[in-house]
Amino acid sequence: MNTISDLLDKYIDWLKGRNYSNYTIKNNRFILIMFIRYLEDLQVVTSDKLSSGHLHAFQAHLAETHTKHGIPLKPRTINTRIGNIQCFLKFLAKRGHISYHLTEILEYVKEPKMLPKGIVKHADMRKLLASIDISNPVGYRDRTIMEIMYSSGIRAGEVCNLTIRSVDIRNATLTVFGKGAKERVVPVGETALKFLTTYIKAVRPFLLTTNEKEALFLNSTGTSLKYHTLFKIIHKHCDKIKQDITCHTFRRSCTTELIRGGANIYHVKDMLGHENLETLKHYVKLGVEDLKKTLKKCHPREKDIH
């Protein structure tokens, strides 16, 4: 009888075979190891010992779990963990390791409908971008990266995976590989394109101290830029506008400005690489002033006022 840990290794291989991203696989492994360790504490080592009672207990455990800072897990975090575990359980059920009814025990918790945080106003974004010292190669690289992220709304992982061949200067586009290794072409704004062109022609050669020929963005040692380095780059500059900024902030801010500017929401969906419009709702933030403008512009009664 295989242990649940052994089955996890097979599940990870299955994810790799389905071309899931390294980031997704890493997160799945992390969550499932925590789940398996919880079961092992209950003396549940093999799949035949798993019962609905164990899963009900784990659901209660998630509700009582706190972060290292003593803060309860957010509903969205709980749901992410439940979703990953359910996929694992379905994998086990399809292969006869557990009963199918066990895949229906864990339940998603209700998430409060809140406006997304972490959106930077355009004036503050301009201030942030302008504050970056571009008199040296590293600073110019940082400015180029952030201009592209704000202009095109691409994900952090997509930025790190860009290659020289991803760039089409003539058509002002980037070819990116999103979640599930899905390819899409995104436009690059004029300002970002100017920085990108100069970076490729005059800055990247100074950073290229190795045999790295493909990666578009390089770290200070001349190798391809990694996610943790990109995170540090963003964090280093965010203090300049006294606002907590992450890599995803640029994506949210780009989306919000496009929607506020009247962009077709279906075009925005395709640009961001979303499967449906439901996902897009998490990125769009319309404040009360935006709603007032919509009311004034669109409601027929507003046209009766003279």
Image: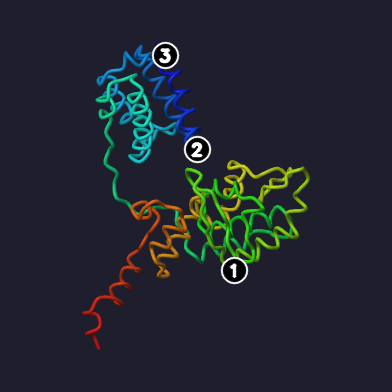
Residue nearer the viewer, 21 or 251:
21
Q: Is residue 106 left or right of residue 256?
A: left
Residue 264 place in picture, x, y as percent = 39, 66
Mark 2 surroundings within 10 Å by alpha-carbon count, few (fewer than 14), some (14 through 19), many (20 or more): some
Residue 43 place in picture, x, y as percent = 36, 11
The quadrant the C terminus occupies is: bottom left
The quadrant the N terminus occupies is: top left
For marks 1 and 3 on the same chain, the one whose residue lies earlier in the sequence: 3
Q: Which residue is mark 2?
A: 19
For marks 1 and 2 on the same chain, the one whose residue lies earlier in the sequence: 2
Q: Which residue is mark 3?
A: 2
Residue 233 place in picture, x, y as percent = 61, 48
Q: Residue at x 29, y 76 (%)?
A: 296
Q: Residue at x 74, y 57 (%)?
A: 203
Up-down relation of residue 66 to residue 156 (above or below) = above
* Disc number for residue 190: 1
Residue 167 place in picture, x, y as percent = 63, 57
Disc 3 residue type (three-letter): Asn
Disc 1 residue type (three-letter): Glu
Residue nearer the viewer, 66 or 38:
38
Distance from the alpha carbon under mark 2 to that under mark 3: 25 Å
Up-down relation of residue 80 to residue 154 (above or below) = above
Q: Answer yes or no: do the residues labelled 2 and 3 have beta carbons within 8 Å?
A: no
SS at badge 3: loop
Task: Write down the quadrant of residue 66 in the picture.
Answer: top left
